[in-house]
Amino acid sequence: MKIKIAILVGLLSFAMTGLTQAQDNWKWPSDPQLEARAREYNASYNDYQKAEEFVSSTKPLSWLLGNTPDLNEALYINGVVVYAGAAEQTADEDQKKVYQDSVITLYDKREELFDNEEKWIENKAYYAYKFYRGDKDKIAEAVAIFDRALEIHGTITPNLVGAYFDLIYRNYAYNDAYTPDEVLSKYEQLSGILAEAEGEGTDISSPKGTLDQLLVAMEIIDCDFIENSMGPKLKEDPDNIKLAQEIFQYSLQYKCTSSPAFLTALEIIDDNDPTFSTSQARGKRYLQNEEYDKAEEMFEKAITLAKTDEQKGEVHFDLARLHSSQGRKSQARDSALEAANFDDSRSNDAYNLIGNLYMQSTNDCRGGQSRVKDYSIFIAAHNAFAKAGNNKGMGQAKARFPSKEEIFTEGFKVGETINTGCWIGQTVTLATRD
């Protein structure tokens, strides 16, 4: 897959281990002349380094590394700064790469001589990212260094997480290095590290934003991937709560909530750790699928889990729609009124639904003995629409009021009250459509 490589500004904020000049265990050469030269070059490279003349510092340092490689660990600690600084100062691109490679080589040699990789592996990873992120042929090497850091410590500094995943992103883009499942696995692993750091009070907004930005840019997750790659795995391992949660979250993020995989994940999550949101969402999916008994069960469950009146109002309105779809008009009205009772902001929706229920009750409530009484249900509908502030609904209902002639013929008067009867059972004031 070819994707555009983004330039991520400010990706890293990483405190490097400080320099050291005074180290124990100096191993000066036994030959007096060689010792004198080693001492001279050691002082020379340090003086150049202090003056930030890094290119000049590389010459005596190179001699020391070649002729007295085990002189002291300070050569490798300071040497990283010298060669990294020289890479910044030189204008020759080929020489710049030589200096950059020397930084990584110093770390390798340091491990060979001093066997203390755990002390500086993240510093090495930092430089590998800095130097190799744009080099197609060396990105895999940089990733391997980050892998090693994670292997040694079992975690990684949060501020390096974005760089780590950026290398994976680039390796995937440049070299087709991973399958989508492998990328996703690494994303989840790094997200877990950030979540743990956040729990300890660390601000992870920057690296987390980088991870999410890159995952979207890789375009590996879509509804097909969730359904055809992640879904079958969940069916094979229905006790895998972590996978169910991943499917649930990705389905929400990528708007794939109509998929069977989403419903399967939702069922597993809700069965194991039900919340108002999961039970309500599950009920809505069953309602969409016309599994009405299951939907009602989930909505009733959601009511018991609701923590606020707004949530109770929301799910009572879900029940109102469910009852309405099943032709249970009286129950639908009761649930709509309950929704409005718990949450006043639902009043308009509730009375609109009730008005429509009345409008749909022509056949249910036609007695055939009195047109005025039969048409009185539309006055009740008009009243409901009025409470909802629905002018269009009011107009449609009024168009079906009884006529003046019908009221007169049947011996009624405008302004007189009458009960609609039927399931509606509303007492209304007679009015005419004309």
Image: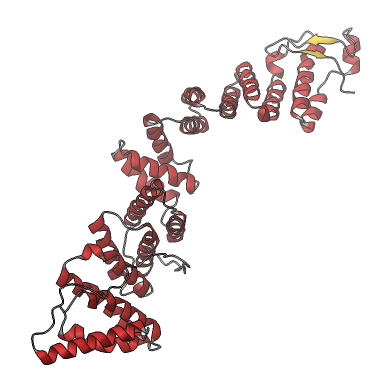
**Residue 177 relative to residue 397: left or right:** left
Residue 123 falls in which quadrant of the image? bottom left
Front position in the image: 236 or 56: 56
Residue 43 falls in which quadrant of the image? bottom left
Front position in the image: 5 or 355: 5
User: What is the x, y in percent for residue 413?
Assistant: 90, 11
Quadrant in which the C terminus appears: top right
User: What is the x, y in percent for residue 226?
Assistant: 40, 47
Residue 49 falls in which quadrant of the image? bottom left
Front position in the image: 22 or 170: 22
Compared with residue 278, is residue 43 higher up or lower down, i.e. above or below? Answer: below
**Residue 44 relative to residue 252: left or right:** left
Q: Would residue 148 be visible to someone looking at this image?
A: yes
- How many numbered tags mark residues here? 0
Q: Would residue 371 be visible to someone looking at this image?
A: no
Front position in the image: 365 or 251: 251
Quadrant in which the N terminus appears: bottom left
**Residue 18 relative to residue 67: left or right:** right
Q: How is the image coloured?
A: secondary structure
User: What is the x, y in percent for residue 365?
Assistant: 71, 14
User: What is the x, y in percent for residue 118?
Assistant: 23, 62
The single residue placed furthest to the left in the displayed view is 30
Compared with residue 271, is residue 170 higher up or lower down, i.e. above or below? Answer: below
**Residue at the spot x=67%, y=30% of the render?**
345
Compared with residue 406, is residue 5 higher up or lower down, i.e. above or below? Answer: below
**Residue at the spot x=15%, y=83% of the render?**
68
